[in-house]
Image: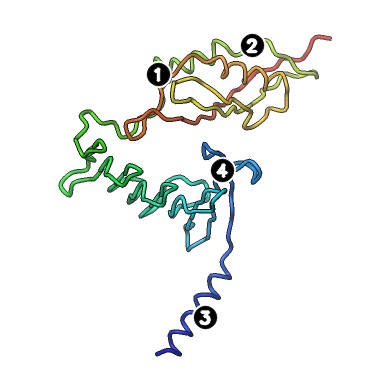
C-alpha cells in the first residue's frame, strides 16, 4: 500500500510540473497592469478546456480567490468559486452553471452571513435575501445593478455624438475613419474618473478628443453590488471621420 501511494504521488507531481502556469498582475481595481504596479496577481493553469485560477494579494501572497474560468480574462466563472478576506475568512462562496449563478453566499468580514442567493428547484428566478450584521433581514436588498448614464444607453450615445469633435483633419489626400477606445471608471459617487486610452487611433488629436469627451461626462447612477455602491468599468469606442488637411 505504501509503494502504491508513493507511486501516485510521483505521477501527480510530474503532471503538475508539466502544466504551464500563466501569471497575470492587477491593480486595486482588478485592471491588468505591470508587476510593479500590482495589488493582486493570479496564477492560471490550463485544465482541459478551462483554466484553474488562484489569485493572491501581492504584498502578503495570501489567497484572494480560487476559481475556474474558460480563459484568462477572469470572467464567467465555471462551477464553484471561493473568495477570501485578508483575514482568511470566506467572503463569497458561489456556484455558476452556464453563466448563471445557482447559489451565492456572501459574508461580512466577521463571518456573519450578509446575503444568500439561490434558485429554487421549481423556478428559474433567483431569490435574494440580505441581512445586517445582527442577522436581521434587509428590505429591498439589491444584489447587483449596473452603472447607468442618466437617461439610459440612448442618452449616453447622444452625449457622445453631440460632444465629439467633427472637424478633425489628417495629413494626406484622402478622408479616413479613425477608431479609438477609451477605458474609464464610474466611481461609487457616479463620477467618471481615470479615463485613459485603451486602444489608440494613432492620431494624437483623435485620442485627445475622445479622452476629453469621456472626462467631461456628467454624473452616472453608480453601480451597486451587495447593496453598496461600487466602481464600474467601461471601454467606450469612438469613430472619427477625418478629412484631409487643406493645402
Q: Nearer the viewer, mark 3 or mark 4?
A: 4
Q: Earlier in the sequence, mark 1 or mark 4?
A: 4
Front residue of this view, candidates 92 and 236: 92
Q: Nearer the viewer, mark 3 or mark 1?
A: 3
Circle 2 SS class: loop
| Residue where numbered disc 4 is placed | 39
- Residue at 57% x, 48% y: name it: 59
In the picture of the structure, the residue carrying the numbered disc 3 is 10
Q: Residues within 10 Å of mark 1 (few under 14, many from 20)?
A: few
For label 2, the residue is 166
Give the quadrant of residue 80: bottom left
Q: Earlier in the sequence, mark 2 or mark 1?
A: 1
- Label located before the other in sequence (3 or 2): 3
Relative horizontal placement of residue 80, taking residue 176 as reference (left or right): left
Dot 1 falls on a residue whose secondary structure is loop
Residue 62, given in percent of the width and then of the height, sits at 49, 53
Spot occupied by residue 180 in the image (x, y as percentages of width and height): 63, 27
In front: mark 3 or mark 2? 3
> Label 4, label 2: how many angstroms apart (C-alpha)?
40 Å
How far apart, in angstroms, are the residues tagged by discs 2 and 1?
Answer: 24 Å
Amino acid at each position: 500500500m505504501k509503494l502504491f501511494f508513493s507511486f501516485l504521488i510521483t505521477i501527480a507531481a510530474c503532471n503538475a510540473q508539466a502544466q504551464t502556469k500563466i501569471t497575470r498582475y492587477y491593480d486595486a481595481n482588478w485592471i491588468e497592469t505591470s508587476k510593479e504596479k500590482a495589488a493582486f496577481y493570479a496564477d492560471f493553469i490550463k485544465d482541459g478546456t478551462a483554466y484553474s485560477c488562484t489569485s493572491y494579494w501581492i504584498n502578503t501572497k495570501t489567497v484572494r480567490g480560487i476559481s475556474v474560468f474558460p480563459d484568462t480574462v477572469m470572467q464567467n466563472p465555471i462551477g464553484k468559486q471561493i473568495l477570501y478576506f485578508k483575514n482568511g475568512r470566506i467572503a463569497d462562496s458561489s456556484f455558476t452553471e452556464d453563466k448563471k449563478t445557482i447559489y451565492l453566499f456572501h459574508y461580512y468580514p466577521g463571518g456573519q452571513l450578509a446575503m444568500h442567493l439561490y434558485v429554487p428547484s421549481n423556478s428559474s428566478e433567483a431569490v435574494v435575501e440580505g441581512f445586517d450584521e445582527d442577522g436581521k433581514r434587509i428590505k429591498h436588498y439589491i444584489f447587483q445593478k449596473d452603472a447607468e448614464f442618466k437617461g439610459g444607453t440612448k442618452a449616453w450615445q447622444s452625449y457622445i455624438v453631440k460632444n465629439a469633435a467633427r472637424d478633425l483633419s489628417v495629413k494626406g489626400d484622402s478622408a479616413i475613419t479613425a477608431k479609438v477606445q477609451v477605458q474609464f471608471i464610474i466611481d461609487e459617487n457616479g463620477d467618471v474618473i481615470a479615463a485613459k486610452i485603451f486602444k489608440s487611433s494613432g492620431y494624437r488629436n483623435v485620442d485627445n478628443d475622445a479622452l476629453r469627451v469621456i472626462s467631461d461626462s456628467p454624473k452616472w447612477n453608480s453601480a451597486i453590488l451587495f447593496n453598496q455602491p461600487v466602481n464600474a468599468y467601461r471601454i467606450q469606442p469612438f469613430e472619427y471621420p477625418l478629412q484631409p488637411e487643406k493645402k
